[in-house]
Image (cartoon, rainbow, N blue to C red):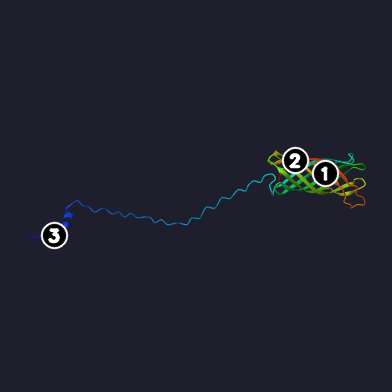
Amino acid sequence: MCYMPLQLLPLILIASSDFQLPELRLEPQLAVFNTFVEPNEEPELNEETLGWGDKGTWRWGVHGGYAEELKNNENELILLGVEFDYFIANNLSLDIGLNLLNVTQIGDNTDGVNFTLQLRWHAIAKEKWSFFLEGGAGLMLTDNNVPQNGSDFNFTPQVGLGFSFDAGDQSRWLIGLRWHHISNANTHRTNPGRDSLMLWAGVSFPF
């Protein structure tokens, strides 16, 4: 008779049964690494569209005016010109003008040219309209003396007020009233001077 060691009994029982060891499945795992991705460039910001009266904008326009001397209404002046405006601050423009003049006066009538430089401040600025104050000076050269006993070269200081109105497509109607002075500032032997009240109107366009 052959005897089996008792230590082998558990192994025999396992071998003779349907016992199966659990399957170990080793699936490859992909290692996840932090990859450096360049950030997308920020989209360019669209510059805000500048509107009427905004600092840094340019405008140009045409205008005409009629002036009558305060002392003698026989002395008249008709003006037609072009103006370039640069807004040095919001609602504050520096205006450069070039005008053709026709001067009616006691004595010889005359024609001339007038260069002006002034500031115009839109003290009340609404989307559809504005109220402005303006003031500046200019140089005037005429064929004959203005007034008749004055000189053919004069200075033209002026101050006034007015309104602007939206005309569509960023265009603007303007209308104003000015005190308009003509004087040679004593650069000539006589300096009679001439003070007039001028009514003017024009239209302004974006540059």
Residue at figure coordinates x 16%, y 54% from the top left = 13
Going by the numbered disc 3, the residue's amino acid type is Leu
Identify the residue position indicated by label 2 in the image.
163
Q: Nearer the viewer, residue 67 or 111?
A: 67
30 sits to left or right of 133: left
Q: Secondary structure at mark 1?
A: strand
Q: Earlier in the sequence, mark 2 or mark 1?
A: 2
Helix, strand or loop at label 2? It is strand
* For marks 1 and 3 on the same chain, the one whose residue lies earlier in the sequence: 3
Return the x and y of residue 102 as percentages of the image width and height: 86, 42
Q: What's the residue type where badge 1 is placed?
A: Trp
**Foreground pick, 68 / 116:** 68
Q: Nearer the viewer, residue 97 or 124?
A: 124
User: Circle 2: is it few (<14), some (14-19), or many (20+) Cα within 10 Å?
Assistant: some
Picture quadrant of residue 74? top right
* Label 3 sits on residue: 6
Residue type of the residue flagged with mark 2: Phe
Asked if residue 26 is positioned above or below residue 163 in the image, the reply reads: below
Looking at the rendering, which quadrant does residue 29 occupy? bottom left
Q: Give the mark, 3 or 2, whose residue is nearer the N terminus.
A: 3
* Residue most extreme to the left: 1
Where residue 197 appears, as percent x and y from the top left, is 84, 41
Name of the residue lying farthest toward the front? 124
Residue 171 location (% of width, % of height) = 71, 41
In the visual, does 161 lie left or right of 70?
A: left
The N terminus, quarter of image: bottom left
Circle 1 residue: 179
Quarter of image, res 199: top right
* Element assignment for label 3: helix
